[in-house]
Amino acid sequence: MTLDPPWQPPAWELDPSQPLYEQIAHRIRVEIAASRLPGGTRLPSVRDLAASLRVTPNTVMRAYAELEQDGLLETFRGQGTFVARSSGVDARAQARIARQAFEHVRRVAADLGMRVEDLLRLGAEAGGGEDDDAGSHRV
């Protein structure tokens, strides 16, 4: 853990139709999962991140609390909030994202009256055709 200047998030556009704290938590989780936020990285203060995202401090505090509950962040009084240094923090973030993605696919399959496997196969077939078309237009 270092007291270097805190990490600054990339420009994020938040969707007001979905809970903002969930979007913030998800974006930070993705940064951790992709190893762009290694263990020990200091995050902006709640107030600084809230100001940069134009949300209330309570929104950021709720996102940080969710990530702490997941074991991805640690807060040290007087020092700030940091990405947890525990081993496997990126794997835990990846697992949570994968679970959320799978649950979404499962709900879509159920809504369509399909099995998950059939939906994935259909998606792969449809996606393959689009990729082939896109590839033929490359210079």
Image (cartoon, helix red, strand yellow):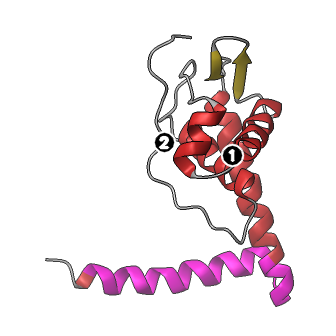
Quick one: SS at disc 2?
loop
What quarter of the picture does the N terminus occupy? top right
Kind of residue indicated by mark 2 = Pro
- Label 1 sits on residue: 25
- Give me the C-alpha separation between circle 1 and circle 2: 12 Å
Q: Residue reaching furthest left?
A: 139
Task: Determine which of the numbered discs, if any, sits on residue 9 in the image.
Answer: 2
Q: Quadrant of residue 67?
A: top right
Check disc 1: other Cα within 10 Å, few if <14, some if 14-19, many if 20+. Answer: many
Q: Measured along the vertical axis of the image, is residue 75 above or below residue 30?
A: above
User: Disc 1 vs disc 2: Cβ atoms closer than 8 Å?
Assistant: no
Left/right placement of residue 120 relative to residue 130 reads right
Query: Which residue is pictured at 66% across the width and 75% down the height?
Result: 120
Query: Which residue is pictured at 81% across the width and 71% down the height?
Result: 106
Between 85 and 82, the residue placed more toward the observer is 82
Is residue 115 in sight in this rendering?
Answer: no
Query: Which residue is pictured at 63% across the width and 67% down the height?
Result: 15
* Magenta: main secondary structure: helix
Specify the segment rendered in magenta: 108-135
Please provide percent x and percent y for residue 121: 64, 79
Between 103 and 48, the residue placed more toward the observer is 48
Q: Quadrant of residue 58?
A: top right
Task: Determine which of the numbered discs, if any, sits on residue 42 in the image.
Answer: none
What quarter of the picture does the C terminus occupy? bottom left
Q: Measured along the vertical axis of the image, is residue 94 above or below residue 35?
A: below
Q: Is residue 130 magenta?
A: yes
Between 5 and 125, the residue placed more toward the observer is 5
Left/right placement of residue 88 relative to residue 67 reads left
